[in-house]
Amino acid sequence: MSPEMGRSAAPDGSALFIAVEVDEPVVSDPGMAAKLEEVCPVDIFRATDHGVEIVKENLDECVLCELCINAAPAGAVRVVKLYSGQTLPALA
C-alpha cells in the first residue's frame, strides 16, 4: 500500500472514480485522523502520529456515504467524483 499524507489523493491517476481532499489543520491532527479512520467503512484514511494518510488503493472503494465529510469540520474534507467533477457536500 502507498499511503499519502493529507491534502489530496487521486489526481495523479491512481484512482479512476474518486478523489479525496483534506485541508489543514485536519491533515496534521492525530485526533481528527483517528476519527476519519474510524468512520470510513472502506479504509480510505489511516491515522498516524503525524495526522491522516490517504490510502490511494482504497479510493475507488468509496461508497459516497459522506461519513468522513460529516466527521470533519465543515469544508475540511471533500470527496470528488472524478467522472463528473461533482464534489460531495457536508450535510447541514
Image (cartoon, rainbow, N blue to C red):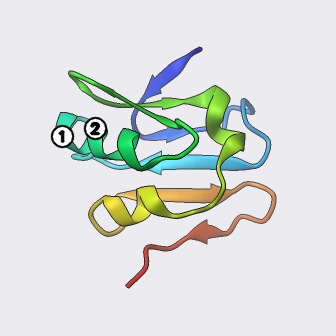
Q: Nearer the viewer, residue 10 or 41?
A: 41
Of helix, strand and loop, which one carries label 2? helix
In the rendered image, which residue does mark 2 sit on? 34
Q: Who is closer to the viewer here, 8 or 62?
A: 62
Q: Would you say residue 55 is visible in this rendering?
A: yes
Q: Quadrant of residue 69?
A: bottom left
Mark 1: few/some/many CA within 10 Å (<14, 14-19, 20+): some
Q: Quadrant of residue 61?
A: top right
Tell me the tag on residue 31: 1
Q: Using the numbered discs, state the Cα–Cα distance from disc 2 to disc 1 in whole angstroms.
A: 5 Å
Inspect the image, locate mark 2, and give the three-letter code of the amino acid beneath it: Ala
The x, y position of residue 51, in whole percent, is: 26, 31
28 lies above or below 80 = above
Q: Residue at x 52, y 36 (%)?
A: 43
Q: Along the horizontal axis of the image, is 86 left or right of 20? A: right
Disc 2 to disc 1: CB gap under 8 Å: yes
Which is more toward the observer, 61 or 80? 61
Quadrant housing the N terminus: top right
Residue 46, given in percent of the width and then of the height, sits at: 41, 29
Residue 20 on image: x %, y %: 54, 47
- 83 sits left or right of 80 in the view: right
Residue type at mark 1 is: Gly
Q: With 43 as the anchor, is 69 left or right in this view?
A: left
